[in-house]
Image (cartoon, rainbow, N blue to C red):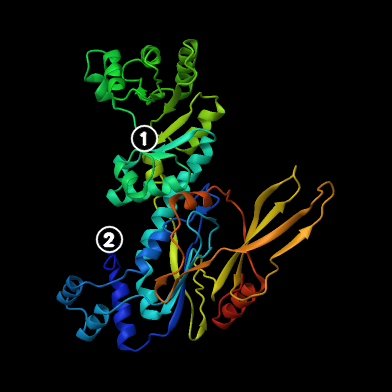
Amino acid sequence: MKNKTMLTDLYQLTMNAAYFENKKDDIATFDLFIRKLPEDWSYFIACGVEDAIDYATSIKFEDEDIEYLRSQGLFKEDYLQFLKNFKFEGEIYAVSEGTPVAPNTPILRVTAKRTQAQLLETTLLNIINFQTMIATKARRVVMAAGRADVIDFGLRRAQGEDAALKGARAAYIAGAIATSNVKAGKEYGIPIAGTHAHSFVMSFPTELDAFRAYVKTFPENATLLIDTYDTENGARNAAIIAKELETKGKKLGAVRLDSGDLCDLSKKVREILDKQDLQYVKIFASNDLNEYKIKDLRKSGAKIDGFGVGTEMITAKPVAAISGVYKLVEDNDGPKIKLSEDKRSYPGKKQVYRFWEIATNYYHGGKYILYDLLALEGERIELGKMIIRPGVADGIYTQAIPLLEQVIKEGRRIRKKPTLEEIRENARIDGGHPMKISEGLQKLVDDLTEKYGGRTK
């Protein structure tokens, strides 16, 4: 990871300078969480956690950074010397990357000297907010696609290189099977996939000539774009190519539709291919797709085996941003609460417990999220119980598992970095569950609200 130390808001440095000069560097705890769900969303996929850990453990002001800050004429020399030796030495608890979470769930909990914990705010939010937004959008697309494959086509519409790379990673975590982004494939080990453009077809005398040229170079499992001129005729040409490949012991992989009535065309193309005994040739579709359009296509019986989704997945359109925040919840004076209207925070160090319902009977086996419980750290929680129900031989029991795990201790990573495939497994869990507040946390909220003159409801 590139050094992101200077990727911060100025007010983090000015607050830090004031804390430093006033010798206010007590231990403080901050929670990073997302307040509200966008319209139609029912959960978030926590993403960017591993990047956040890498950032926190690698903060270092370089000489050129100090020189730049000195040139601004804002900071005293003793503070600049403090920054020169600055490093994060605190602890961080985090949910596992890829975990579905409810609003107000602490994705990260940071405890450190105030100057250290405060300085992390902007960059942590930059990392977590964007990647969580794209991962959640991508998960919605993947869920809408059902058994059909989803491939990230977003590179050309992403808002810069970093968004394209992190967006491709987030989409893969959320269940996309591949990306068209070659650099993302190289950096993260994501499978890469692609077809060819309309310009390739137009570069040859006929569509058939173009298809023959393409499969000459890529004879195994190629995908042909068939809508440059006439989609149905393109399908017939693709069938000719598929039969020619069969004589060579090869197979055409798929055809791609990129315009028109995708549902109607997919049915006609499927019929054309099947009449030539080409049931194995898949139909792939693109063209400004999103979860709503994909759901409608499936509902209408479209014969589509895979979707290439670009603009709306890599930008999370129409969601421009999500409301991730980083709030002080405790320091040496005790728990802290923010009481602003619509921006209240939950005080104190907390843990999140995920309550599962687990059926152990062979015929009724399964594991389902019931709800999450936000509780004070150390608060006594009933973690599991067996419930015998009629007709379920082995019973059903609930089990609670803490989601926040310590990942950084004394400034060092203590949790082994998971593989991308392991992170991807976390995102396979269905979200959309409620968040409950424990009795102990609710009492603390009420007590602090009364203390600071606010209303409890």
- Which secondary structure, mark 2? loop
User: Seen in the image, is 268 located left or right of residue 429?
Assistant: left
| x then y, percent, for residue 329 | 49, 75
Residue closest to the eye, 44 or 320: 44
Q: Is residue 146 above or below residue 254?
A: below
Q: Which amino acid, mark 1? A: Ala
The residue that disc 2 covers is: 2
User: Seen in the image, is 147 located left or right of residue 307?
Assistant: right
Residue lying at 32% horizontally and 78% vertically, measured from the top left: 15
- Asked whether disc 1 touches disc 2, contact meaning CB atoms under 8 Å apart, the reply is no
Q: Is residue 369 above or below residue 193?
A: below
C-alpha gap between disc 1 and disc 2: 27 Å
Residue lying at 48% horizontally and 86% vertically, measured from the top left: 332
- Which secondary structure, mark 1? loop
Disc 2: CA contacts within 10 A as few (<14), some (14-19) or many (>=20): few
Image mark for residue 193? 1
The quarter of the rendered structure image containing the N terminus is bottom left
| x then y, percent, for residue 170 | 42, 49
Residue closest to the eye, 153 or 325: 153
Q: Which amino acid, mark 2? A: Lys
| x then y, percent, for residue 51 | 38, 60
Q: Residue furthest right?
A: 390
Q: Is residue 204 above or below residue 38?
A: above
Residue lying at 39% horizontally and 40% vertically, measured from the top left: 191
Q: Is residue 91 above or below residue 78?
A: above
